[in-house]
Image: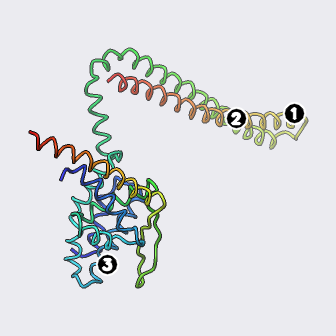
């Protein structure tokens, strides 16, 4: 897959992984990697970017005597998922056109 | 490699980031390794699984192109100087005038300091003279006048010295600004 395209996908996948409930680093990598290849070092800059642009919020929780950082989806984060799905619908139409034109040739 | 060693080494390699961001990254990897060991992975394997330090650093730089390494910044500056050798030579008269002007200003300020010290010294000599004369002749109205003059001398000396120190600071800043401005012009023309 194209690197830029993949980057965009991973970002939305991370948001999607947080849709049901807040999550933490290890769990996000595990959940997302079931669908798309992602490493721990790739995830960190994405989380940071999503937090900076307001799609995520963070809080810390004491788990078994150590602090764990949780990431939580904001309203803007939810909107970004919806926007992505809408954009993808338009994209499907374009793909359909590309496929059809391919058949003619 | 053990977790603590890994975090320590990673910290060293993140020197180009601000303290808060560095701590956030270290906490992130520390938490990941701890989570993995809690699930039964060996500490060394958990460290290996989060990726190499080189990979982590390169991913961070990739996602954060604004981050300028202090070392690289310096190299860039010196490179830009390299391209301006001709301009540097053309500006030699300006450098000389600036240098002479700076030297003159420093000399003037320095002479003020010397004057201040001389005044203080004369005040001290007057005190010594007064004490020695007081042992020979009895105190008179003249003595009071001389004491007054000595106090004035001390005061003047202090004003001269303090004033010239302040002036020196100002002149130093001015010289720095002049040279900074000139080298900026040199770089700006690149």
Pick whichever, A92 or A33, lies toward us: A92
Q: Earlier in the sequence, mark 3 or mark 1?
A: 3
Pinpoint residue B78: horizontal percent, then vertical percent. 29, 34
Name the chain under label 3. B
Residue under the image location 18 percent in, 53 percent down: A1
* The disc label shown at residue B159, or none: 2
Question: Which residue corresponds to the image point at 27% horizontal and 81% vertical from the top-left?
Answer: B37
Q: Quadrant of the C terminus of chain A?
A: top left
Q: Dot 3 corresponds to which residue?
A: B35
Q: Nearer the viewer, mark 3 or mark 2?
A: 3
Q: Are marks 3 and 2 on the same chain?
A: yes
Estimate the spatial distance between the alpha carbons at disc 1 and disc 2, rounded to whole Å: 26 Å
**Left or right: B47, with B146 as reference point:** left
Q: Which mark is residue B142?
A: 1
Indicate whether A4 appears above or below B173: below
Q: What SS does tag 3 mark?
A: helix
Q: State the residue in front, B184 or B137.
A: B184
Labelled pair 3, 2 in contact (Cβ < 8 Å): no
């Amino acid at each position: 897959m194209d690197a830029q395209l993949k980057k965009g996908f991973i970002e939305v996948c991370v948001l999607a992984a947080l849709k049901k409930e807040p999550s933490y680093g290890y769990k996000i990598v595990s959940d997302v990697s079931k669908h798309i290849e992602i490493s721990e070092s790739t995830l960190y800059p994405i989380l940071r970017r999503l937090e900076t642009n307001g799609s995520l919020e963070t809080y810390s929780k004491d788990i078994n005597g150590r602090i764990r950082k949780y990431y939580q989806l904001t309203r803007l984060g939810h909107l970004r998922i919806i926007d992505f799905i809408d954009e993808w619908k338009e994209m499907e139409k374009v793909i359909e056109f590309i496929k059809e034109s391919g058949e003619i040739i | 490699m053990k977790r603590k060693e890994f975090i320590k080494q990673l910290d060293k390699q993140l020197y180009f980031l601000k303290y808060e961001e560095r701590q956030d990254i270290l906490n992130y990897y520390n938490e990941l390794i701890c989570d993995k060991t809690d699930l039964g992975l060996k500490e060394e394997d958990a460290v290996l699984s989060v990726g190499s330090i080189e990979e982590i650093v390169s991913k961070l730089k990739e996602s954060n192109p604004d981050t300028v390494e202090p070392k690289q910044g310096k190299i860039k500056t010196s490179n830009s100087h390299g391209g301006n050798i001709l301009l540097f030579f053309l500006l030699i008269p300006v450098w000389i005038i600036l240098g002479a002007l700076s030297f003159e200003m420093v000399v003037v300020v320095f002479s003020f300091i010397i004057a201040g010290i001389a005044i203080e010294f004369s005040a001290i000599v007057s005190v010594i003279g007064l004490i020695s004369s007081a042992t020979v002749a009895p105190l008179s109205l003249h003595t009071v006048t001389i004491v007054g003059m000595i106090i004035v001398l001390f005061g003047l000396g202090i004003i001269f010295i303090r004033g010239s120190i302040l002036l020196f600071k100002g002149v130093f800043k001015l010289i720095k600004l002049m040279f900074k401005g000139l080298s900026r012009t040199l770089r700006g023309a690149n």
